[in-house]
Image: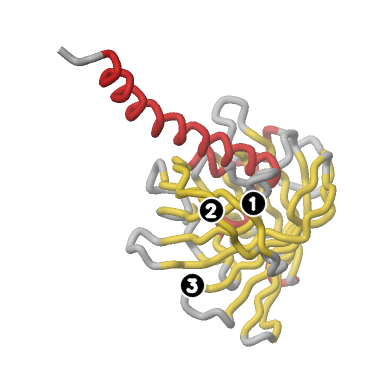
Amino acid sequence: MKSPIRTLLALCLIVAPLARAADAQALLAASDAIRNPDRPFALTTTLTEYRNGKQSDATTLTVYSRADAKSGQFRTLLRFVAPARDADKLMLKDGNELWFYDPASKGTVRISPQQRLLGQAANGDVVTVNLAGDYTATLAGEEEVADGERKARRSYKLLLKARTPDVTYHRVEFWLDSGNSQPIKGRFYAESGALLKTAYYRRYQPQLGMVRPTETVIIDGLDPNWVTVMRFGGYAWRDVPESWLQRDYLPRFKPE
């Protein structure tokens, strides 16, 4: 017969990891809330690709996004603004499905979130995503990490494991500020274990009621001289009609 002390110790061994997992998921959700506004919104995303320090390509997108009431995950419509050759092309994220519409061909095709959009930015990087909805987080520890401004910050390191195979990354190492949950850095991996990219979240500014990162610097996993910078501006609350988030509506979408 087990003693009460042994039973208590056994319970502690079971409950403690569960509590840490719950804490890690809550930390990730708090970090998501800093990146993503909690009401329908629009913004402008500019992606600029650099090779060996020189700009090699760029594109500009208008993003309309709102959270799904049931899943909490975001549904997003992106309109390509520039360059001119891509103007008015559309990308729609509904659940974990991504659709691309080209007005020239008037065709809509399904695309992969892992597919490269520009530089090191994949399709899944430019749509709005709550990581806590797509990944299971565990707390790996607390450590000091250099942020995107090369300043040392005390952080929690989370290990994220994909809940389903149709998300952008198989696993992620994610650092967030231990004092305010601001995302600092992420390392994103393929299913093979290869490091695909490292991202730094920086240039925090007040936007839509919260201090949010307005720039993400993405560095290639193999070539550190291949860098893509995502800049976010023009934040605004705005209605995003349900019709805009329907695949069949893409040919009829008119920007306002």
Q: Which residue is mark 1?
A: 183
Nearest to the observer: residue 95 or residue 162: 162
Task: Name the kind of residue labelled 1 in the image.
Answer: Pro
Quick check: 88 left or right of 74?
Answer: right
For marks 1 and 2, give the CA distance: 8 Å
State which mark lies toward you, 3 or 1: 1
Q: Earlier in the sequence, mark 2 or mark 3?
A: 2
**Residue bearing mark 3:** 221
**Which image quarter holds the N terminus?**
top left
Residue identified by numbered label 2: 174
**Dot 1 or dot 2, earlier in sequence:** 2
Look at the numbered discs 1 and 2 and tell me whether their residues touch, using CB distance below 8 Å: yes
- What count of labels does the image hold? 3
Q: In the rendered structure, which amino acid carries the disc numbered 2? A: Phe
**29 and 41: which is toward the camera:** 29
Circle 3: element type: loop
- Residue occupying image coordinates x 36% and y 25%: 12
Depth check: 147 or 166 in front?
A: 147
| Nearer to the camera, 177 or 93 | 177
Specify few, some or many for label 3: CA neighbours under 10 Å numbering under 14, 14-19, or 20 or more.
some
The relative height of residue 225 versus residue 216 in the rendered view (above or below) is below
For numbered disc 2, what is the local secondary structure? strand
Relative vertical location of residue 136 with respect to residue 115 in this rendering, above or below: above
- Determine whether 254 is above or below 29 in the image: below
The image quarter in which residue 106 lies: bottom right
- Residue 12 visible (yes or no): yes
Residue 58 drawn at (x, y percent): 70, 73
